[in-house]
Image: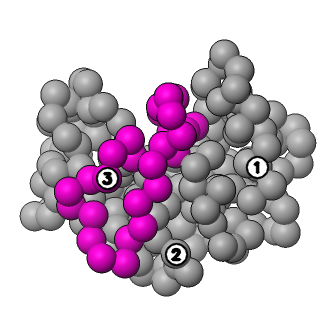
Amino acid sequence: MLLAGGASRRMGTDKARLSIRGKPLWQVQLETLRKLEPNQLFVSARIDPPWRREGVLFVADIPPSRGPLSGLAASLDRISTRHLMALAIDMPWMSNEYLKFLCAQIEPGRGVVPKIGDRAEPLAAIYPREAGEEIRNALAGTDFSLQSVIGDLITAGKLRAITVTEQQKNLFRNVNERADLQFT
C-alpha cells in the first residue's frame, strides 16, 4: 500500500507530483512496490489521486481523516493477504532490497516495524491483518499518534521492532521541503 493522503502543508504543493531522479514521487514509489510483485497494490488517500494508474486500487481513508492511521485502517480492511506493507509516498530513498528484508522478517499474525533509536518508522513497515483491531480502536479514541499505536502493537506481539543500522538510516529520509529533494 502506498500512503499518499498527506496534505503536504510544509511543501505547499502535492508531494506526489514532485520530481526526483526524473520521475514524480508517486511513480518512484509505485515502481519500488511493484518490484515486490504484490498480490494487490493500493494507494491510500483522502481522495482518489489523478495519477493513480490501472491495476492500482484506490482505498479512501476512513473519515474523518486522521492521517496515516485512517489509511492503514481502511487498507487492512481490504487486503486479501495476511500482511500489509505500508510505504509513504514521501520516502523515495527506500530500497527494494530493504523492503524484501522486511518481508523476510514477518511471521503469521506478526509484522515488523523498523526503529531508529526509540522512534518507530511506521510508514515503511509491514502490518498483520490482526493489527486492524488496535488501529480501529485508536481511530475511535483521541490519540491518533502512530507511535502510540505501534507501541501497543509491539506490546501485543503483533509487531516486532527491527533496529535500523546507521547505514540504513538514509532510506527513511522523507521529503517535506523542496530542499529535501536534493539529498543524495
- Mark 3, residue position: 48
What residue is shown at x 26% (from left), y 53% (from top)? 49
* Kind of residue sitting beneath label 2: Gln
What residue is drawn where x is 71% and y is 38%? 136
User: At which x and y percent is residue 28?
Assistant: 27, 65
Q: Find out whether the residues at labels 1 and 3 contact each other: C-beta distance under 8 Å.
A: no
Query: Considering depth in this image, is 110 or 76 the residue closer to the camera?
Result: 76
Q: Is residue 129 magenta?
A: no
Q: Is residue 56 above or below residue 139?
A: below
Q: Magenta segment, principal secondary structure?
A: loop
Residue at the extreme front:
63
Q: CA–CA distance between discs 3 and 2?
A: 17 Å
Is the residue 95 above or below the residue 49 in the image?
below
The residue singled out by tag 2 in the image is 40
Residue type, mark 1 in image = Ala
Which disc, if any, is residue 7? none
Residue farthest along the right direction in this orientation? 156
User: In screen coordinates, is 56 left or right of 120?
Assistant: left
Of 56 and 85, nearer the camera is 56
Residue 107's spot in the image, x, y percent?
82, 68
Q: Which residue is mark 1?
A: 131
Point out the stretch of residues depicted in magenta: 45-71
